[in-house]
Amino acid sequence: MSIPFKRVAAATLLAFAFGASAQTPATGTLDKIKTSGKVVLGVREASPPMAYMLGAGDKYVGYHVELCERVLKDIAPTARLEYMAVTAQNTIPLVQNGTLDIGCGPTTNNTARQQQVAFALTTYVSEVRMATKVDSGITTLDQLAGRNVSASTGTTAVQLLRKRERAQNVSYNTMLGKDHLESFLLMESGRADAFVLDDNLLAGIIANSKNPGAYRIVGDALGSEPIALLFRKDDPAFKTAVDDSLRRMMKSGDLEKIYTKWFVAAIPPKNTSLNLPMSAALKQLMLDPNDKPLEAYAK
């Protein structure tokens, strides 16, 4: 049975994460779960379709939340599941000190983070791509040369566009929005010909727009980032258990079914579809799973 974990004030979370008690527990995670009878899952409140909250804080859903639940049912079938809402900033410290047993949000696996925590096998590959209007005729990055392209300030999309300008000797008129919605508005209003961002975020914005059918995600990926569940670094037995469970789901086809449920079928609360079929990169990872960091994906 799953029950919601009581909300913890931000100050308390920070005290847990950065205070004197923030030390790695000596007990292995599987032993800790057996002794306590529960597992604490770190989830996000607003990162659909990966992890998000429905209703008044009593239910967390999403692709990575369901994967976590399935894995834990497999490796700790009698344990009670408790959910703690976390942020991108405090997830890793809370995993390190044992407050969280597993992080179920959309966290990128990179070499710097691998020094702090361990990552499971990659279960999502976020690709930076572009959204365009269906009637624009634009389907490739090459067609953007000399055109207006919107991107959000501070995102990797901006860096990747500049990198491609240098590599391909092309020029884009990059228009920066202060956030994703403003960047989308630049394209929606016709001031920009394309909007560049992570594909899952693009899909979510399009699905919630006034006219979702008017836009599509096209073109090759400018860059890719591996996303994975995470847990303590010094606990190889727990990593093996989680990875083996994920491998079984990949081999049986269950993971692809869960992916389809959250990225292709209609999802709550608006019952709209992100219409984001599994990428070639993720399909390959289902056949040959690994936990390689972001740097291995660099072009």
Image (cartoon, rainbow, N blue to C red):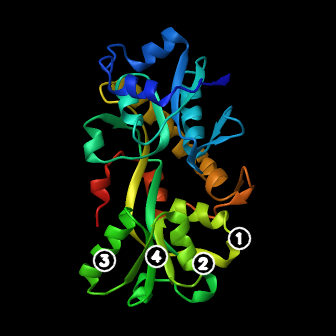
Left or right of residue 239: residue 138 = right
Front disc: 1 or 3 = 1
Q: CA distance from mark 2 to mark 1?
A: 10 Å
Using the rendered image of the protein, determine whether residue 278 is visible from the camera's viewpoint: yes
Disc 3 crowd rating (10 Å Cα; few below 14, some 14-19, many 20+) is some
Say which quarter of the image contains residue 236: top left
Using the rendered image of the protein, determine whether residue 276 is visible from the camera's viewpoint: no
Residue type, label 3: Arg
User: In what element is the residue under mark 3?
Assistant: helix
Q: Nearer the N terminus, badge 2 or badge 1?
A: 2
Residue that carries the numbered disc 4 in the rendered image: 150
Asked if the residue under mark 2 is in contact with the one under mark 4, i.e. CB atoms within 8 Å, the reply is no
| Count of picture labels | 4
Disc 1 crowd rating (10 Å Cα; few below 14, some 14-19, many 20+) is few
Residue that carries the numbered disc 3 in the rendered image: 164
Q: CA distance from mark 1 to mark 3?
A: 31 Å
**Residue at 43% of width from left, 42% of height from top?**
88
Q: CA distance from mark 3 to mark 2?
A: 24 Å
Asked if the residue under mark 1 is in contact with the one under mark 4, i.e. CB atoms within 8 Å, the reply is no
Left or right of residue 146: residue 51 = right
Q: Position of residue 13 (x, y in %)?
A: 44, 27
Q: Position of residue 77 (x, y in %)?
A: 59, 21
Residue that carries the numbered disc 2 in the rendered image: 188
Residue type, label 4: Ser
Residue type, label 1: Lys
Residue that carries the numbered disc 1 in the rendered image: 210
Asked if the residue under mark 1 is in contact with the one under mark 2, i.e. CB atoms within 8 Å, the reply is yes
